[in-house]
Amino acid sequence: MQDRIEEIRKQFTAEIEAIQSLDQLEQLRIKFLARKGSIAELFDALKNASPDQKPVMGKLLNELRSLAQAAFDAAKSRLEQAAQPQEAPFDVTLPGRYVPLGTKHPIVQTLDEYKRIFVGMGFSIVTGPEIENDYYNFDALNFAPDHPARDMQDTFFIHGSKILLRTHTTPVQVRIMEQQKPPVRAIMPGKVYRNEAVSARSLVQFHQVDGIYVDKGVTFSELKGTLVTFAKQYYGSSIKYRFRPSYFPFTEPSAEMDITCYLCAGKGCRICKHSGWLEIVGSGMVHPNILKRVGYDPEKISGFAFGFGVERSLLLRAGIDDIRILYENDLRFLRQF
């Protein structure tokens, strides 16, 4: 019987290799794998084998049936695939299909440009918590409890009067100086929140980039040089600028920097209130009280600080007169960036 099994195996192998169509393959299945096929007949004959031969013959028959079935399945798959109509070859001369891709939001692009410019001037990038406490947001920045300057910023308080949404990114300056000895040179980008009426010029949430440089012998001239360098890289080398005295509780002396209005080229328009100038940054020398509070000696250490409104910078450079459009997600607008 073992010779007969080997004979069927060789016969099946030879015939399946010669198969050229599904019809021939079906005839082969009927001949070998059907209920009355050659392999089934061998299983029927197994009952007549001696008891000591049945295990050996049974194993050989199972191997033969598995081999035949696997070869049949492979041949059937190959022939069915060959019988399917072939697709026309790809025409490489056809124009490609347009696949729209997302891009960074213009505010994110603006933040990236701020980072690029200031990192190029030696500043590091530091972030801080958006949920802040009263000490870092006001007290540590020289706002006395009854200081009228607190009214400059309408605040979202979360828990009583001690926990709040930060009104500026300036608190991060104090946190850095508490943890690091001079020199300190860093910018602090992030979201800020103020309880203001939404209008063409204000939102309850917007972005700021604060900056600080503290070391021995830092001067106001270095502050001016830093801001002018930034402005010429961001707004263009042809801009005109000016510095005006101002007031901030955390700097002394304080100044604001203006540049010529982008929309009217300095001639005067509605956006610049017909002055020809637009304010882009508040700045000043770090107040000695703040230096003392973080453990610095104001007799030996000095520094400057500044703060930009990111949305305002974007509006000025792009000539947009309504800040709300930045958050409306209008693709017609966003695709321009």
Image: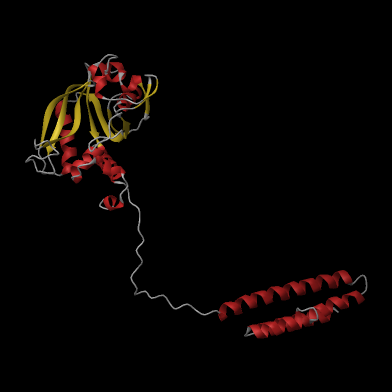
What x and y, as percent, mark residue 314? 23, 42
- Compared with 59, 107 (above or below) is above
* Residue toward you, 77 or 14: 77
Question: For this rendering, which residue is in front, 2 or 65?
Answer: 65
Residue displayed at 39% across by 19% down: 160
Circle count = 0
Q: Position of residue 213 (x, y in %)?
A: 24, 28
Task: Judge left or right: residue 284 versus residue 108.
Answer: left
Q: Is residue 107 visible?
A: no
Give residue 70's position: percent from left, percent from top. Answer: 69, 73
In the picture, the quarter occupied by the N terminus is bottom right
Quarter location, residue 139: top left
Q: Residue at x 29, y 35 (%)?
A: 207
Query: What residue is rendered at 85% in x and 71% in y?
Result: 56
| Quadrant of residue 273 within the rendered picture | top left
Query: Residue drawn 64% across and 75% down?
Result: 74
Q: Quadrant of residue 309?
A: top left
Q: How is the image coloured?
A: secondary structure
Q: Is residue 153 visible?
A: yes
Q: Position of residue 12 (x, y in %)?
A: 73, 82
